[in-house]
Image (cartoon, grey):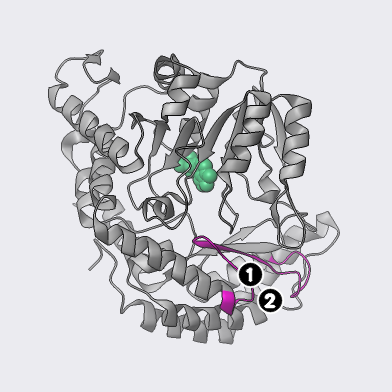
Amino acid sequence: MASKVFKLIAEEAHRQKYELEMIPSENYVSENVLKALGSILTNKYSEGFPHTRYYGGNEIIDKIEIYAADLAKKLFKVPLAFIQPYSGSPANMAITMAVCEPGDVVMGLSLSSGGHLTHGAKFSFSSIFYKAVNYEVRGDDWRIDFNQLEELAKKHKPKLIWAGTTAYPYKLDYKKFRKIADMVGATLVADCSHITGLIVGGIHESPVSYVDIVMTTTHKTLRGPRGALILVTERGLKKDPEIKTKIQRAIIPGIQGGPHNHQTAAIAVSLEEALKPSFKKYAAQIAKNAEVLAKELGTVSETHLILLGLTDYGYGLGYQAQYALEEAGITINKNTIPGEPASPFYPSGIRLGTPALTTRGMKGKDMVKIAGWIKRALEEIRGLDLPKEQEKRKDFLRKAKLKLKGNKNLKQIRKEVEIFAGKFPVPGVK
Ligand SMILES: Cc1ncc(COP(=O)(O)O)c(C=O)c1O
């Protein structure tokens, strides 16, 4: 009898095809990436690095890992690449361990300003084992406050500065980051996870000539399997000639065991794809789509994502918006907005993006249509403001969800969305 899992995978495939996937960190990988991921390479243990494995039988695995690293070096124009991090968070942990001693100061953009957990957020290893200092965004347009960043850097003398974001709709000025890092002798690390595809596509400037180390997840705009790359630049090698050994030791035995070889192979396939001219077209279309979508929603985007504050609709409406849109067949995520007026758990904004829709072949005119559905769906959350009293929130949100579940307008939008989405192919889904 076939595993129950395959029935559930079929249900998820249906969801992926008939809904609009707009979480900006998600994408659809190619059938070749899926093939490599589902291969027999998962059977092999290969702790260590090519030619220095603990176990035998790794001749072919060595070739695959070396090939993947060579592709990464070629694509990003760096002298050193690591393919083994299981995902972005462990990669950032490995970098922090390689660069810092426990207790050293690390600086990153705060979570509520659009930074990542691993850049010094509360409850993350990055603030448990290190002294985390956060810089922020400021002003009506929510841009990084470089004056504050400089002041904080001079005061706290960080060993590591993160230049990377997870909910920030603008291009990053790596030159400014470099200048501040040099003032205090910090190692500068670009975490490009969200925007790597745009960098590879030439839409955003590459950080490689400005920073010491680059980290990127492979599964977002780069359109590979889940995973991450650590890339060391010429500058980084010069700054610390021991950095290769330090990163290797941080990966294993520091935090990981055997590498996921099926994942390494799938990363190699996705890097081959990213090296093709067609990837540049894809990246340009992601950005064009985001620009159109942002404009239709009354905001701006220089990236693949849009951060939309919902304070015009009411108080603390991010959760309600996420649920209403899910009912309408549109998947986005609730998100804090800078200076979050409500709560990190029930925030005041949503984050949405175009990488996955663009993979399916959607263009500007489709974004206009989608923005129309989003605006219609958001009308349905008016009046569902989060109670100011914390103890009332759970019960209120349970009732709000029930109300949205039975909402006729959202059901009508879902019908329209399903007819529309079903016309665009999803690789690996019939
Ligand atoms: C900027 C950034 N860094 C790191 C990560 C962590 O990646 P993962 O979820 O693969 O651990 C993310 C994921 O959202 C991210 O956006």
Q: Nearer the viewer, residue 277 or 210?
A: 210
In this picture, is 230 found above or below 317? above
Question: Quick one: 391 or 203, which is closer to the camera?
Answer: 203
Q: Is residue 66 visible?
A: yes
Residue at (18% x, 41% y) in the render: 39
Please tell me which residue is depicted at 32% across the width and 24% down the height of the picture: 258
Q: Mark 1: is the Cβ under 8 angstroms from ligand 1?
A: no
Marks 2 and 1, how far apart at CA: 6 Å
The numbered mark at residue 381 is: 2
Identify the residue at the far right of this view.
389
117 lies above or below 410 = above
Kindly check if marks 2 and 1 are in contact, taking CB atoms under 8 A apart as contact: yes
Q: Which residue matches tag 1?
A: 321
**Mark 2 vs 1, N-terminal side:** 1
Magenta part of the chain: 295-317
Identify the amino acid type marked 2. Ile
Residue 320 in magenta stretch: no
Residue 148 percent coordinates (x, y)? 77, 41
